[in-house]
Structure formats: structure tokens, C-alpha cells
Amino acid sequence: VWAYATVGHFSPELFEKAANIALPRLNEFNSQNIANMVWAYAVSNLPSSVEFGSHSELVRLIVSSLDKFDDKELCQLHQWNLWGKERINKSLLPLDVSGHCLKVFSSTKVSQSRLQTDVARALQSIGVACKEEAILNSGYSID
């Protein structure tokens, strides 16, 4: 499902069938499999994703193996958790885990685009002061 989500192909039937196969086999998944999967379901934003995201065994597995997730995977968990907060109005992860994922996500180096740099330089050249990056409470940055 990760590959389909990455290219923006969201087939409700595919995601539902994948969830039916994956959920009983979660204990066979490593941290990368879990992070890629939950991120894909969040990105798909399909109705079956809500049920998938609130599956208690999935959350238990994430919490019990949190030390095995690298920074990229923790960022994916954060994005999934943000999706849960928006979609079903609750955090999918316990507060301490959610906070840890947010901390990692927020500390990820932001790379500025050439366009952003050019616009900031043009504004400054005409005397307009601007802040090039702002970090939101969600951990996302805007320019």
C-alpha cells in the first residue's frame, strides 16, 4: 500500500483487502513495514483507514517496539497520528509516544527551495522584512 500511496493511487478495495491481510499478521512486521503502512493509510484517507488506524493491536505493537523506529519512521508515525487527530478527533498514539514523534518530526532539517530563497531575497531588496520559515504546532514548517 505504501507504493500506491506514494504515487497517489487510492483504491478502496485494495486498501481494505491489504488491511484484512495485514492486521492478523502485525507481529511479523518490522518497524519500517509498520511506519510505511500506517503512513499509507493516513495518506489514502479512505473510510477503511479509520478502522485500521484505531486498531488496538497496531498501537500496542508500535508502543512496545518504539525503540526500533528510526527518525524517518517516527516522522511517518507522527504524520499518521496527525491524520488521526484530524480525521477522528483523537490521537492514535499515547501522549508520550505522540510527543516523542512530534519532537523528532520538528527537529528534521528543513531545506529551502530555490524559489523560497529568491522570493525572500527579492522582498528584502525592496525593504520588506520577512521570516523565511515558521514552525507550526503540528511540527510542519511553512514559508
Image (tube, rainbow, N blue to C red):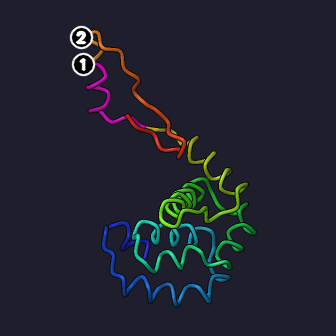
- In the rendered image, residue 37, in percent from the top left (x then y), is placed at 51, 72
Q: Can you say whether 111 is above or below 105 in the image?
A: above
Residue linked to disc 1: 122
User: Would you say the magenta stretch is mainly helix, strand or loop?
Assistant: helix
The three-letter code of the residue at mark 2 reads Ile
The three-letter code of the residue at mark 1 reads Ala
- In the rendered image, residue 64, in percent from the top left (x then y), is placed at 75, 69
Taking the image as shown, residue 70 lies to the left or right of residue 18, namely right
Task: Find the residue positioned furthest to the top.
Answer: 127
| Residue 112 located within the stretch drawn in magenta | yes
- Would you call the spot at circle 2 few (<14 residues within 10 Å), some (14-19), or many (20 or more)? few
**What residue is at 32 percent from the left and 27 percent from the top?**
117
Residue linked to disc 2: 126
The answer to which image quadrant residue 112 occupies is: top left
Q: Can you say whether 12 is above or below 42 in the image?
A: below
Q: Secondary structure at mark 1?
A: helix
Q: Can you say whether 88 is above or below 133 in the image?
A: below
Taking the image as shown, residue 131 lies to the left or right of residue 71, namely left
Q: Which residues are magenta?
A: 111-121
Q: Secondary structure at mark 2?
A: loop
**What residue is at 63 percent from the left and 53 percent from the top?**
101
Viewer-nearest residue: 67 or 98:
98
Mark 2 and mark 1 residues within 8 Å of each other at the beta carbon: yes
- In the rendered image, residue 45, in percent from the top left (x then y), is placed at 41, 70
Q: Where, quadrant-wise, is the N terminus in this rendering?
A: bottom left
**What residue is at 59 percent from the left and 63 percent from the top?**
90
**What residue is at 46 percent from the left and 32 percent from the top?**
134
